[in-house]
Image (cartoon, rainbow, N blue to C red):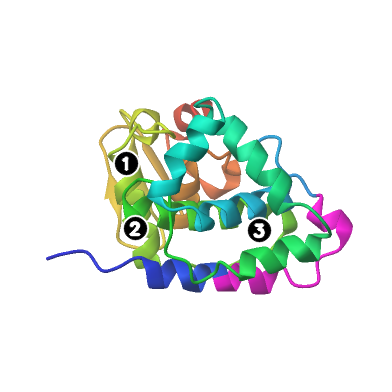
Amino acid sequence: MAKSDPWPTIHTEREALAGDLEGLTDDQWRTRSLCEDWTVRDVLGHMTATAKIGAGAFFPKLIGSGFSLERMQAKDLVVETAGAPTDTLAGFKAQVQSTKSPPGPADTWLGETIVHSEDIRRPLGIAHDYPAEALIRVADFYKRSNLVMGSKKRIAGLKLRATDTDWSTGDGPEVAGPMLSLVMALSGRKVPVADLTGDGVGTLTSRVG
């Protein structure tokens, strides 16, 4: 059976994130995100830039940045974080329903939406419930891939098991925890040790960050 279209979930999650960020103070916008060197405002600007660019425009932009993805992202952030934080939020809202994306499987952008939303929410202390089926879909996508994030290598020799839904993968010392925390660990984010239990926690956390 073919997988369902992930874009409705992506749109819903973008809209929910935009709602959560209404009324942030300037200090909150400057909060360090879970992405190294980026504030929560920077992450939102990055999400906006990604939602604006289709596959056809991606490579010319990359070439124009000397084939450096980091340089291209830095240029995008200058544009998307110009003006006041409310301007950055307005720019994101304008792209909530976009189905544009750089080259890559659609599950890449579902994962990016969830993980980057948490990159913003967690440092701000904002809790959010994501659909279990979306988290499982992202985890199943990440566990098979070393592209960009190196998730397959990160969890090699370990068993991951969700404690709040029916999902597990791998063999070896166990790492158990909420599905969202496992997704974040798969993506390479540092997850609070209190979120995870099992003999494999030390090994996994040593491979994160």
> Pointers 3 and 2 in contact (CB under 8 A)?
no
- Relative to the observer, which residue lies in front, 155 or 6? 6
Q: Give the amino acid type for the residue marked by disc 1 in the picture.
A: Lys
Q: Residue furthest left?
A: 1
Residue 88: quarter of image: bottom right
17 displayed left or right of 205: right
Give the mark, 1 or 3, whose residue is nearer the N terminus. Answer: 3
- Magenta span: 15-30
Q: Position of residue 24 (x, y in %)?
A: 81, 66
For residue 196, above or below residue 29: above
Q: Is 188 part of what is drawn in magenta? A: no
For residue 203, above or below residue 88: above
The residue wearing badge 2 is: 136
Q: Where is residue 111 in the image (x, y as percent from the top left)?
A: 43, 53
What element does badge 2 sit on? helix
Q: Give the amino acid type for the residue marked by disc 3 in the picture.
A: Arg
The residue lying at 31 percent from left, 48 percent from top is: 141
Which disc number belongs to residue 143? 1
Residue 170: quarter of image: top left
Q: How far apart are marks 1 and 3 (CA)?
A: 23 Å
What element does badge 3 sit on? helix
